[in-house]
Amino acid sequence: MTSNVALANNRSWLDFLRKTGVWVGILVVVAAIYGYTTEPQVTTSMLASTLRQSTPLVLGALCGLLGERSGVINIGIEGQMLLSAFVGFLANVYTGNLFIAVAAGVLTGALLGGLLAFMSVTLKMDQIIGGTVINILALGLTGFFYQTGLTTQGKLQPIALGPLADLPLVGPVLFENPPITYLAIILVFIMHYMLFYTRWGLRTRAIGEHPRAADTVGINVNRMRYINVSIAGGIAGLAGAFLTLEAVGSFERAMTNGRGFVALAVMIFGKYMPFGVWGSALLFGFATALQTQLQFSGTIQIPHQFIGMLPYVLTIVVLAGFVGRTRPPAAEGQPYETE
Amino acid sequence: MAIQASEKGPTSSFGERLASFWRSASVPIMAILLAALIGAIILLLSGANPIDAYAALFKGSFSNARAIGRTLEKATPLILGGLAVAFAFKGGLFNIGGQGQLLIGAIVSAAIGFGLGGLPFIIHMPLALIGGAIAGALYASIAGALKAYTGAHEVITTIMLNFVAINITDFLANGPWKDEGIVARTPAILETAAIPKLDNIPLGFFIAVAVAIIIWYLLFRTTLGFEIRTVGLNPNAAKYSGILVARLTVLTMAISGFLAGLGGSIETLGVVGRFQPGFNVGLGFDGITIALLARTHPLAVIPAAILIGAMQAGSSQMQFDAKVSFEIIDVIQALILFFVSAEMIVRWILRIRADGDGGVRLSSGWGQG
């Protein structure tokens, strides 16, 4: 890998797309067409489920990406998602207003992002320990305040995008989704634009690659890390809101089920690029959708526990195969000391 | 930490030793007090009386011989879980996979415990004990090998392996190793494999303490321990001094997994008597708190584990007497972890200078092998 991958943005994501994305894309399209001609209903539900399963992973990975691009490793995504899912759920129970509920989830995530920034920037704690604190804290707080028997008034419903939703296969898969699923896709584009075409993006990449140089030209490294890690936390909060307000509609203990960690693998596999992250989240979403499909259909005689391992084993394989070939931002994990 | 203080040599006076002990023990002690204080505030906010809650917690963990026995019983896997994390820390690795390694160790020891009949106690029990520990070691060395040879960060791989272990053990307890009846669990272990109890005192606790001493000796008195600590402090320097870093990474993870697996074995053979899914959930995270509370020193792991074990042992009494949900324990643990790691806050409160040891630095990006 050349040293300026992260800054030479367009070239490398095109490279990435050429190398893996195209093959995955061709495979998916061929499989989808073949599936649609033989089993239209199963194929449609599989692809729709893939997109939905990928949503929390896209959001979690975007959270990780923004943090690491700014030089802060975030392994607390799991905890940020969990507590946001819980607070969003409670807000829905007590206000009955889904908009307020989602906002409460996002705000919770942002506050936990602020806590991570406080630990890693101000206290200069080890960032991996800091993230672990968030994970354990979220597990404890949600367990302590959780009461069984709370019910909500509904969850976010799919919005059909006019005539587009009537298209065969593509319609129900892409254009008839609940709001956070759309929002996750829009955020991929926004993140790409913001990171590579705005002054904020240039500065963010600078403080993740070479904070000293950024400081020299007058960027307030630590303040910017605070802001970015908080925004990133808000994105993880949206992923949490997705779980309780869009996907399930209720809260369960430890319901994130490792998604926050899978999201980190998604981020690495996506080479710290928003579009790469989207592609790899779709792959992981597909693995989960496949797992669910296999468990329900019962066509293959494999014990369900082995199918249940699929997303986790895939994460390990992807990490083992790709981690050495991506180059993370150079300054991640290190507190920045002003002189 | 008294051991560390005495290492300064015979020349240091009692006063100096006390000062040195205070420097290393003050942060953990203050962290516990601060966490208890904030825990009390959370209890107040949730409408409970914190004094009643803490009193019940103490009553349930130390008030009589049975309570103390339960505390030591709870502390046993925690000592081993804490040692597993602390040992890996010394080698620069963060093993969050204690949970998975414990599960694998527990089910393998259960299988040896119920499957091998006709052996005398003197062979059967140690065999089941060590068998589980070795299974944990092998399982952890997967993450070690992935780290050493592909650079995949152990924090993610060990967490993923936890989920894989839950599925594997769930499959075994529902399938090939299932007991008769409808409950998903293995048959009970044979009497020859059980770790005996003396009155209220679980013998497993003494095994755990002995292992802590062995690990201390291994780390601070042997060449292997020196090499592991060197890799932990500076892998590049270790490489140039001729240490085989990759091999040592696998070995460090394996020993760490051995400890967690042993925790699973002792719990199975000494407490539960069989394997059932949902066994000792959350041990991996407890181990992290304990290791950092002990500032990664193997002997300090023992009191740290007894503290957390006491909280767990007393939590049902607290739930009964003060109507406080036992998850408050997890909140307090997270706060302890926060204050122990956020040394700066505590040192500022106490106005003491840093002693320069016990700090942990792990994050240097995902790619470094």
Image: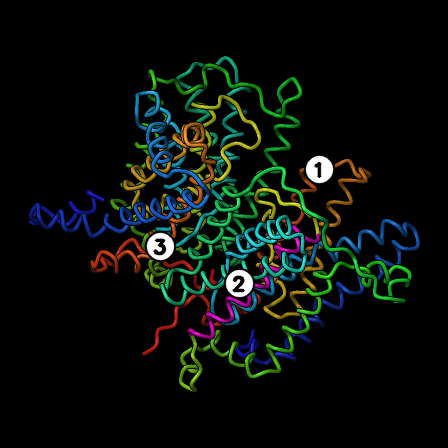
Q: What amino acid is labelled 3 in the image?
A: Ser
Chain under numbered label 3: B
Q: Mark 1 or mark 2, which has the lower sequence index?
A: 2
C-alpha distance separating marks 1 and 2: 37 Å
Q: Where is mark 2, residue-wise?
A: A110
Decide whether residue A240 is among the magenta residues.
yes
Please name the amino acid that badge 2 sits on: Ala
* Callout 1: chain: A
Residue B361 falls in image quadrant: bottom left
Respond whether the residues carrying marks 2 and 3 are from the same subunit.
no
The reply to whether residue A321 is in sight is: no
Residue A77 visible in rendering: yes
Per the image, label 3 sits on a secondary structure element best described as: helix
- Label 1 environment density (alpha carbons within 10 Å; few <14, some 14–19, many ≥20): some
- Horizontal side of B24 relative to A126 (left or right) equals left
Give the Cα distance between marks 1 and 3.
40 Å
Dominant secondary structure (helix, strand or loop) of the stretch shown in magenta: helix
* Residue B52 falls inside the magenta stretch: no
| Rendering coords of residue A80 (x, y %) | 54, 56
Amino acid marked by disc 1: His
Q: Which mark is residue A304?
A: 1
State whether residue A316 is above or below residue A235: above
Label 2 sits on a secondary structure element that is helix
Mark carried by residue B341 = 3
**Residue at image location 48% in from the left, 73% down from the top:** A208
Q: Quadrant of residue B276?
A: top right
Q: What segment carries the magenta color?
A: A222-246
